[in-house]
Image (spheres, rainbow, N blue to C red):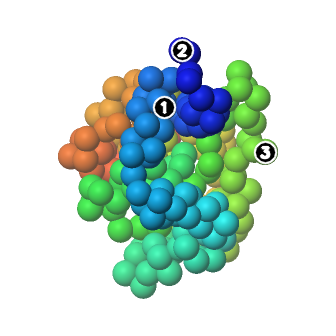
Amino acid sequence: MNFSSKLLEQAVDEFGRLPGIGRKTALRLVLHLLKQSDMEVSRFTQSLSNLKENIKYCSTCFNISDEAICEICQSLKRDKSTICVVEDTRDVMAIENTNQYQGVYHVLGGLISPMDGIGPADLKIEGLIDRLRKGEINEVILALSATMEGDTTIFYLYRKLKEFNVQVSTIARGIAFGGELEYVDEITLGRSIATRVPYERNVS
């Protein structure tokens, strides 16, 4: 791709670093921004700066938040005795959109993937264990993607959680193997949460 401007090329290169954005899409986005007013471009860049500078991660569940403790963890309406363990914030949003779950969450920040050099120590697993040590949790739902990495993480967590007196369940597999939660339709995901099953059934 030939560029008439080095500044244009640099901007396209930066947009192209974003996941799922190819060079042609990056070019369209940059050209779109060039057509916008200075105020609109300034608002766009300022929102990104504010995001990076001010975003927080909930000290309890590690979900992205505006406050030290997220709204879900603060809510008096949520069932604090049930924790749904997910990979990242996108999965929290997907489950919340189903309106089928009233417990709280724990965001791991990834999945165990030896091929990518991601091990248990790289995830927020100890934070989950600390929450269980307080003895206020009755059930842990492992709502991870139906992939090899997801299953590996579920098996690891199950072994860690066996020492606690809690029910460990997984979402029902109405989700095809290889599917990621954020792409599952809300009805299927909602039913999978509602019809979750004890994990030991899957390993017996």
Residue type for callout 1: Ala
Q: CA distance from mark 1 to mark 3?
A: 35 Å
Depth check, mark 2 against mark 1: the one in front is 2
Tell which circle, 1 or 3, labels the residue nearer the N-terminal end.
1
Q: Nearer the viewer, residue 107 or 67?
A: 67
Write down the residue under mark 3. 121
Where residue 137 sits, quadrant-wise, is: bottom right
192 in relation to 26, above or below: below
The front one of 35 and 143 is 35
Q: Find residue 143 and report its horizontal and vertical position in percent.
A: 46, 46
Q: Which residue carries the number 1 mark?
A: 26
- What residue sits right under mark 2 in the picture? 1
**Label 2 with label 1: CB-CB less than 8 Å:** no
Whole-percent x, y for residue 57 in the image: 63, 65
Query: In the rendered image of this protein, does residue 202 appear above or below residue 187?
Result: above
25 vs 117, left or right, is left
Q: Callout 3 environment at 10 Å: few (<14), some (14 to 19), or many (20+)?
A: few
Q: Earlier in the sequence, mark 3 or mark 2?
A: 2
Residue ID at (44%, 81%): 75
In the image, farthest residue toward the left: 187
Residue at screen point 47% across, 76% down: 71
Q: At numbered mark 2, what does the secondary structure look like: helix, strand or loop?
A: loop
Q: Tell me if residue 83 can be seen.
A: no
Tell me the element at label 1. Answer: helix
Residue name at image x 40 percent, y 24 percent: 177
Q: Residue at the spot x=55%, y=58% of the render?
A: 45
| Mark whose residue sits in front, 1 or 3 | 1
